[in-house]
Image (cartoon, grey):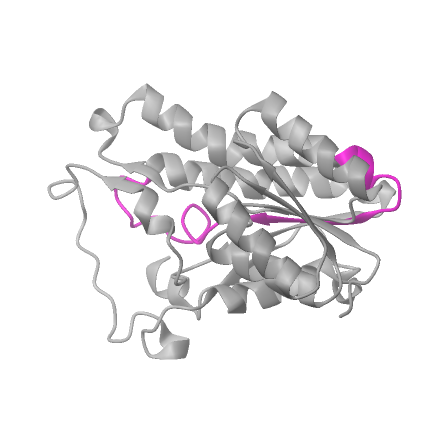
């Protein structure tokens, strides 16, 4: 699954799944356009790719801000002259709280980053992808697609469910340009996304849920790794998936089948 002569644009490239995917796609020969809102994370991934002999152009942007993101994508697309792979990965967990305690601003922030950010990432990369076709991969979640037992995660789950609908719409709209659009739905993965989760007043709102022993059946309860998700991203980015579009793929060791 070589990606020589391909350019991959990745949001949230500096940490977690984005970081692992950036390293793997670069290892397979792709040139990298790395978008992050955190300068420290961006600097780190740039050094790692350059130390491995890869080619990378970084850009700092908040994906929920159209002007920032458009400028970042244009910088990458114009510098490389093409974009072939788009990994719309950046997102937040946001605030998890009972509906009466969730403020409109908190709802808006989660939807703005997770859903609007996905829309903007695809919107501004499509002109480059249309030149030769390519692959769009969107990071959703088991939440909002198979799992609905995480009380208080309403904004997050709605954003993740909407990403799947968005991908299906785009898969049909862009098919005539030979652009594939697919969604990955990770379960429990060892990343730092929980650091941006603000859980509030959930004790009385939660419904009791009983799990069989070993919450993740395939791995005896152990969470997956960012590298395992990156392997799936590589498959969807490569020509090995050239007849797959409009599809969501759960990568969770069958965890969500216990919770659905």
Q: Is residue 22 above or below residue 107?
A: below
In the displayed structure, does residue 19 sit left or right of residue 76? left
* Front residue of 152 and 227: 227
Residue in front for this viewpoint, 237 or 3: 3
Residue 79 lies in what quarter of the image? top right
Is 98 placed above or below 211 here?
Answer: above
Asked if one can make out residue 184 in the rendered structure from this viewpoint, the answer is no
Residue 233 versus residue 164 in the image, above or below: below
Determine the residue positioned at 88% across, 46% down: 132
Q: In the rendered view of the protein, which quadrant contains the N terminus?
A: bottom right
Q: Which one is in front, 150 or 27?
A: 27
- Give the residue at x 68% y 67%: 27
* Secondary structure, magenta segment, majority class: loop
Where does the image place residue 129, in percent across and percent down from the top left?
80, 41
> Which of 186 and 165 lies nearest the eye of the viewer?
186
Is 77 inside the magenta-drawn segment?
no
Question: How far across and how far down the image is residue 192, in percent?
Answer: 37, 54
Residue 21 in percent (x, y) is at 59, 59
Looking at the rendered image, the quarter that the C terminus falls into is: bottom left
- Residue at 69 percent across and 34 percent down: it is 73
Q: Where does the image place residue 117, in percent across and percent down from the top left?
A: 55, 33
Q: How many marks?
A: 0
Q: Would residue 253 be found to the left or right of residue 248 on screen?
A: left
Q: Quadrant of residue 100?
A: top left
Residue at image position (21%, 58%) is: 209
Res 129 visible: yes
Magenta stretch encompasses residue 144: yes
Residue ranking furthest to the left: 204
Q: Is residue 124 left or right of residue 175?
A: left
What stretch of residues is rendered in magenta? 126-153
């Amino acid at each position: 699954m070589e990606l020589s002569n391909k350019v991959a644009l990745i949001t949230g490239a500096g940490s977690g799944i984005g970081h692992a995917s950036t390293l793997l796609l670069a290892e397979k020969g792709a040139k990298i356009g790395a978008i992050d809102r955190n300068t420290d994370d961006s600097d780190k991934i740039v050094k790692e790719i350059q130390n491995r002999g890869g080619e990378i152009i970084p850009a700092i942007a908040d994906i929920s801000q159209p002007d920032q993101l458009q400028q970042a994508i244009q910088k990458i697309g114009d510098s490389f002259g093409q974009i072939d792979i788009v990994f719309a990965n950046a997102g937040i967990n946001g605030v998890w709280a009972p509906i009466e305690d969730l403020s409109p601003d908190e709802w808006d922030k989660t939807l703005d980053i997770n859903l609007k950010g996905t829309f903007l990432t695809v919107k501004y990369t499509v002109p480059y992808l249309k030149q030769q076709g390519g692959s769009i991969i969107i990071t959703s979640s088991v939440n909002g697609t198979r799992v609905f037992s995480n009380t208080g995660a309403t904004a997050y789950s709605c954003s993740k469910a909407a990403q799947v609908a968005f991908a299906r719409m785009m898969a049909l709209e862009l098919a005539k340009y030979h652009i594939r659009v697919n969604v990955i739905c990770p379960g429990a993965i060892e990343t730092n996304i929980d650091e941006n989760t603000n859980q509030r007043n959930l004790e009385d709102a939660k419904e009791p849920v009983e799990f069989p022993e070993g919450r993740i059946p395939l791995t005896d309860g152990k969470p997956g790794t960012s590298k395992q998700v990156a392997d799936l991203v590589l498959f969807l980015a490569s020509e090995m998936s050239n007849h797959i579009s409009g599809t969501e793929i759960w990568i969770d060791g069958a965890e969500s089948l216990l919770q659905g």
